[in-house]
Image (cartoon, rainbow, N blue to C red):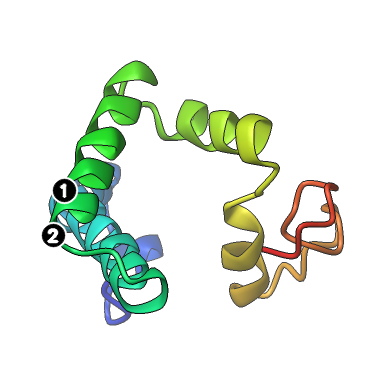
Amino acid sequence: MNSKVDPGKMTPAKYIYMRKQQMKWMAPQITAGILLALHRKCGFGYERCARVYEQIAAIEEECGWDPARTLETCLTETGVRVLEKIKRAEGDNGKDKQADDTGGNGSGV
């Protein structure tokens, strides 16, 4: 998000417009980060990255492009609570959440 923008000084319509514009670059940026991590840390090449990219698109479609549903599916299937690190970075410190990012399975991811 643009740190120079004060959402409190925006009309609701302008805020919604800004958030919709962000979605155009946020999803590709996140996907690129995942693919780069797989390439750099796990040695994935073009073929494997392309298959993962296709799988990400299939999962998004399966979840109806609903971020909350995708996050819940991730937690249910992998045990990883994706938003935990984000909330800590924003100062929430995960007070109402578990102390780790594993959803309680101890994987330490």
Q: Is residue 1 visible?
A: no
Q: Amino acid at mark 2?
A: Tyr
- Rendered location of residue 7, percent (x, y): 36, 62
Between 17 and 81, which is closer to the camera in this rendering? Answer: 81
Q: Secondary structure at mark 1?
A: helix
> Which picture quadrant has residue 3?
bottom left
Between 32 and 99, which is closer to the camera in this rendering? Answer: 32
- Rendered location of residue 104, percent (x, y): 85, 48
Q: Name the residue carrying label 1.
A: 50
Tell me how far mark 2 sits from mark 1, CA to CA. 6 Å
**CB atoms of marks 2 and 1 within 8 Å:** yes
Residue found at x 35% / y 17%? 62
- Up-down relation of residue 2 to residue 107 (above or below): below
For residue 103, the mark is none
Residue found at x 40% / y 69%? 42
Q: Amino acid at mark 1?
A: Ala
Give the position of the N terminus as an image quadrant: bottom left
> Which picture quadrant has residue 49?
bottom left
- Up-down relation of residue 79 to residue 29 (above or below): above
Q: Secondary structure at mark 2?
A: helix
- Up-down relation of residue 37 to residue 22 (above or below): below
> Which picture quadrant has residue 18?
bottom left
- Rendered location of residue 93, percent (x, y): 77, 71
Q: Name the residue carrying label 2.
A: 46
